[in-house]
Image (spheres, rainbow, N blue to C red):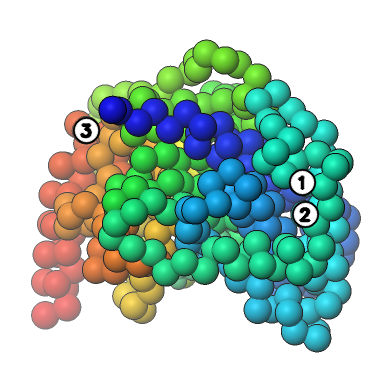
Amino acid sequence: MSLTYSAERQVAIAAVRRACVLTDSVFNKLVRNETLTKDDKSPVTVGDFSAQAVINTILGRTFPQDPIVGEEDSADLRTESGASLRARVVELANEALRADLRTGEKEEWGLGPKYTYSAEDLMETIDRGNYAGARSGRMWTLDPIDGTKGFLRGEQYAVCLALIVDARVELGVIGCPNLPADAADPTGARGSLFVAVRGQGAYQLPLADPLAESVLQNRLVIPAFAQDELNLLESVEKAHAKLSFNERVARLLGITRAPTRMDSQAKYCALARGDGGVYLRMPTGVGYKEKIWDHAPGSVLVEEAGGIVTDSRGEPLDFGLGRTLGENYGVVAAGKAAHGKVLEAIRLAKQEEDEHKL
Ligand SMILES: Nc1ncnc2c1ncn2[C@@H]1O[C@H](COP(=O)(O)O)[C@@H](O)[C@H]1OP(=O)(O)O
Ligand SMILES: [Mg+2]
Ligand SMILES: [Mg+2]
Ligand SMILES: [Mg+2]
């Protein structure tokens, strides 16, 4: 029997859409209209917890046996000083879960005005995300807000959910509230949702009503770029990736176009729809281990769009080692034609770097 994961797909799309409505409203209510000090991370914290509560509630109702590897846990909400944060999370999560049903959603998923969730319900639900990960069995992995820095700047961020079965990513859904629907029209309508099921292709859907169409359109295929059309997709934040190394790799590849800097897994989405040719993420050397929720949805999306995703040495990403990617070193995602060339350029760039150090 081949598994189509159609129920999982539908639930994951609905859950990510609801979480995106929530994060978008958190941004509008708390970031845009309030005067925040530069380092105030409270809106993103509220958004992280509430979005994880919403998605985990829906997964808990629909797939109660499945463990979840989620980025957040409720510890900060349970402290005395977390009381006002907790109250905000309860309010926002209820608002998102109680909103009227949309096409393709079902009341038994815990959705609609019939339900009310208490603080205790929601904190327990957030903690369904405490699973440690495993090599075998089914599990979901969730990043309720990926690209928190981008979120606070009003730039790119993503709500990211994936289903992993026996360490292989089978389904990925990424909601990008701020990503222009059409890459060729950067000032046009924003809000895109990306979905891929292993063996069934990668698709872009409108975030506003992603389950409205019964037949999937807009299949994504990474084009075979000519050398002079390639450019790198990389982090905005210098602390997240070694951008000086990217520059070296770009030069060795003969890339002349400037890199596209974008926060979050929106980079994988851009790559999948042919907007930029190479996702390159090299470790900064401080021993940070990449998390599975930061790459699982993006990797299946790119693979289903015809691309290849490995670490910087060409090894497959290992989603079976727990909450992190363990020994994987960096991430390279690109179309089939470009991927091998990028690995070779990385090898040469490392050599160059080592020679400079001698
Ligand atoms: N020191 C770090 N090195 C690499 N990635 C990091 C580091 N600190 C946080 N991240 C995570 O990197 C991802 C964003 O990277 P990018 O630069 O590609 O947008 C996020 O998942 C972010 O977490 P978070 O989900 O909390 O924002
Ligand atoms: Mg993240
Ligand atoms: Mg996050
Ligand atoms: Mg975080």
Res. 180 image quadrant = top right
Looking at marks 1 and 3 on the same chain, the residue that comes earlier in the sequence is marked by: 1
Looking at the image, how many numbered discs can be counted on the residues? 3
Q: Residue at point 34% right, 78% down?
A: 287
The percent position of residue 305, horizontal first and vertical second, equals 35, 29
Q: Which residue is mark 3?
A: 336
Label pair 1/3, CB-CB below 8 angstroms: no
Q: Residue at point 18% right, 68% down?
A: 353
Secondary structure state at the residue bearing disc 3? helix
Can you tell me whether the CB of the residue at mark 1 lies under 8 Å from the nearest atom of ligand 3?
no
Q: Quadrant of the N terminus?
A: top left
Q: Amino acid under label 2? A: Ala
Q: Is residue 108 above or below residue 104?
A: below
- Can residue 67 be seen here? yes
Secondary structure state at the residue bearing disc 1? helix
Q: CA distance from mark 3 to mark 2?
A: 41 Å
Q: Residue at point 59% right, 43% down?
A: 62
Q: Quadrant of the C terminus?
A: bottom left
Res. 242 image quadrant = bottom left
Q: Which residue is mark 2?
A: 93
Q: Which residue is mark 1?
A: 97
Secondary structure state at the residue bearing disc 2? helix
Label pair 1/2, CB-CB below 8 angstroms: yes
Q: Is residue 31 above or below residue 223?
A: below
Q: CA distance from mark 1 to mark 3?
A: 41 Å
Any mark on residue 109, and which?
none
Q: Decide if residue 258 is on the left or right side of residue 358.
A: right
Q: Residue at point 14% right, 72% down?
A: 354
Q: Nearer the viewer, residue 96 or 139?
A: 139
